[in-house]
Image: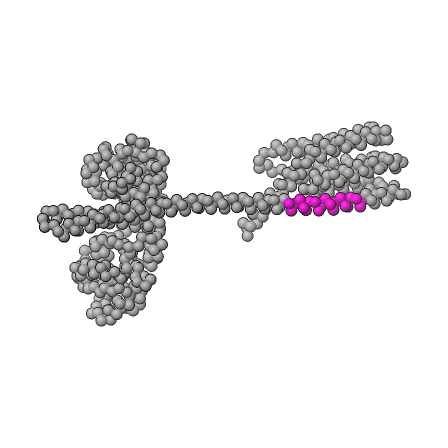
Amino acid sequence: MVADASVAQGFQARIHDEQIELLFRYTPLAQMTNLTVATVLVGFLWRVIDPDILLGWWAAVAVVVLFRLGLTIAYRRRAAGTRIAWHTLMTAGAVLSGVTWGAAGVLFFVPESAVTLVFLTIILAGMSAGTIASHSSWPPAQFSYAILTMTPIAVCYLLEGSELWILGLMCLIYLVNVLAFARQLSRTLLESMRLRLENQELVQQLREEMSAAEVARARAEDANLAKSKFLAAASHDLRQPLQAMNLFIEALRTEKDPVRAERARVALGDSAQALEGLLNDLLDISRLEAGLFSPRIRIISLQALFDGLQRELQPLAEEKGIELGFVRTRLKVASDPSMLGRILRNIITNAIRYTEQGAVLVGCRRKGDQVAIALCDTGPGIEPEFHKAIFREFYQLGNPERDRQKGLGLGLAIVDGLCRILDHPLELKSRVGHGSTFSVHVPSAAGDLPCLDDTEETASSGLRGFAVVVVDDDLAIREALAEVLCGWGCHVLTAESAGDALSQLADAAFSPDAIIADYRLREGRSGTEAIAGIRRALGRDVPAAILTGDTAPERLREASASGLLLLHKPVQPSRLRAVLSRWHAEAVGALHELA
């Protein structure tokens, strides 16, 4: 309601401005007409009326004309945003002009001269009617002028008596007709203004909508093109390690030389790791789009973070024959350790890959309440026009052949997304041929915070006797999980649906301690529904996890909304064992408390 009232007030203000603009538009011509007609009248009456009276009246008319012309000049030269009641000033000018012309009807009223009366009446009637066009945009000015111009001579006719009172009555009737016509014209003009302004607004709105539609169309085309490039690049990069794995598997089937077989196994493992790395990056891109990253802010010692990154990435730098250095620091920051570590790791890895000689140096310095972590390299540098493009998915400079040794083009896209989530501004400075510097600005901190539990921390407790229900409609996945879980000493029950699981549990010798279910099951069912059904049948909330290989952001949001632990395929066995061990330890602790 407030917004609607504000819009209405704004529209009314625009109409008001249009009325004033139109009022001033015809003022110069109207005033020159005033002065001309006044001069003619003085000339006609020169031998009938005392010249001093005529000249005095003409001078009064001239002063009013100059006043109104001055107002017009001031209006034209007004500064933007000035708050002056121009309509009031122009109404005052119309009143003064009406008074001067009305005075002529009294000063020059000569009953003895019929010619003088006829000429004077015609002049005053013409002046009162002639301003309809110039004053119709502002009725108060028009009415004031016409009434003050015609009323005095009409009163003189009425007071004179004899036959002249008829002329007075006719003057009043004429005045009423003039005012009625002026009122009707003013209404028509006002409606015309309103329609014109509404049409202008509609045209402007249409232009804005067309512009927005054009922008949306261009964005859709860009998104479609980016999606096509994304899928093409992802397909290529996924096929490469899969092709290598297929070839190494075939080699292992036929190779009899143990040494060559061992090399094939190592290469097979490297290809599997490369494939897993790509899938994890794709998953992170989808998680970023789905908004599933939830920062857990802690106070972090940057030196401890640097030490871990140096141990991890030093071999990669040594393989390239470049130096990797970290400037020691005592600074602490407030951030999510895992996410900040991922940001720095991705930038450093990218710098090592593109630096052929020289060094990659990491350091930090305090800037107000922020700590700027700078990562500098002596690589080829990045041209300014590519500073934004390098943060897009699968975008790479100087790698048209999609060489996996140069990365996959996802690392900096993940960096950009994580920096936005953490609200850590990311800055890039680069000179072609001299290297690049990435700066991540992180809030400074002091003191320490207690460590938060990490669900991926490996538990030391055993799993012997721990009962797990696996629900997955893929037979190969069920069998593989059963083999791994049985190897850890678990009791395992595998099923392709919730109904199948409940049917088997009715005859099972154990009650499940945990449930692992695939998110997508047959017949449009989901793992969350299967877990809920099993829990209802058992009458208790059995610890459960969802396994999913779906990377669509909307699917990830749905799975995350279930509140269940989300495990992304391909899940590392160590990660799965850590989760089960934690649940097992919690179950054992609960039994001890009951005992």
Judge whether residue 2 is colored magenta. Answer: no
- Outermost residue toward the bottom in this view: 507
The tally of labels here is 0
- Give the color scheme: rainbow, by chain, secondary structure or one colour: one colour
The image quarter in which residue 463 lies: bottom left
Residue at the image position 42 percent from the left and 44 percent from the top: 218
Q: Seen in the image, is 465 located left or right of residue 434?
A: left
Q: Where is residue 417 in the image (x, y as percent from the top left)?
A: 34, 45
Q: Position of residue 137 (x, y in %)?
A: 67, 42
The image quarter in which residue 314 lies: top left
Q: Where is residue 17 in the image (x, y as percent from the top left)?
A: 62, 41
Residue at the image position 83 percent from the left and 29 percent from the top: 46
**Viewer-proximal residue among 158 and 474:** 474
Label the magenta part by its dominant secondary structure: helix
**Viewer-proximal residue among 218 and 460:** 218
**Viewer-proximal residue among 267 and 373:** 267
Residue at the image position 11 percent from the left and 47 percent from the top: 260
Q: Position of residue 89 (x, y in %)?
A: 67, 37
Judge whether residue 182 is colored magenta. Answer: yes
* Quadrant of image for the C terminus: bottom left
User: Which residues fall within the magenta stretch?
Assistant: 172-192
Q: Determine if residue 269 is in view.
A: no
Q: Determine if residue 8 is in view.
A: yes
Residue at the image position 30 percent from the left and 40 percent from the top: 396
Looking at the image, is 550 positioned above or below residue 42? below
